[in-house]
Image (cartoon, helix red, strand yellow):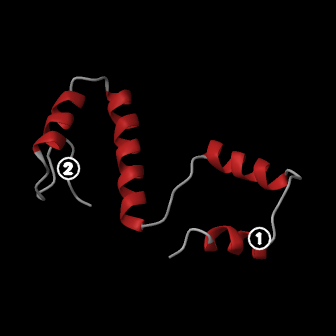
Amino acid sequence: MGVEPGKMAERPVTRLMADAVRRLADLPEDRQNEIARMLIDAADAELSGEPQLTEQQLTEVDQALAEDGPYVSADEMEAFFARYRR
């Protein structure tokens, strides 16, 4: 991925992205890296086409799955959605 530090990639970016990068340059290095990681994670998620959950979201899913609660059968779900299908 050979873009050396301080240089932009050869692929064009939007004006908004270029402005964002210029503004980020005024931040301390650790904040630049933190925000860069967030952008990379977001781009990777978009490119993969698969939803990417945070650790907190994964924990919430695990907790919800572990709860005993009122569940509906597949037939009940089908009947529910059938009412709204055309």
Give the image quarter of residue 74. bottom right
Residue 61 is situated, as x and y percent measured from the top left of the image, at 70, 51
- Asked whether 11 or 33 is in front, the reply is 11
- Asked whether 14 or 74 is in front, the reply is 74
Residue 66 is situated, as x and y percent measured from the top left of the image, at 84, 53
Task: Say left or right for 20 vs 80.
Answer: left
Q: Give the structural element (helix, strand or loop) at label 2.
A: loop
User: Disc 1 marks which residue?
Assistant: 76
Residue 6 shows up from this direction: no
User: Disc 2 marks which residue?
Assistant: 4
- Asked whether 10 or 18 is in front, the reply is 18
State the mark number for residue 22: none
Task: Say left or right for 55 vs 51.
Answer: right
Amino acid beneath label 1: Glu
Task: Say left or right for 2 vs 82.
Answer: left
Question: Farthest residue toward the right?
Answer: 68
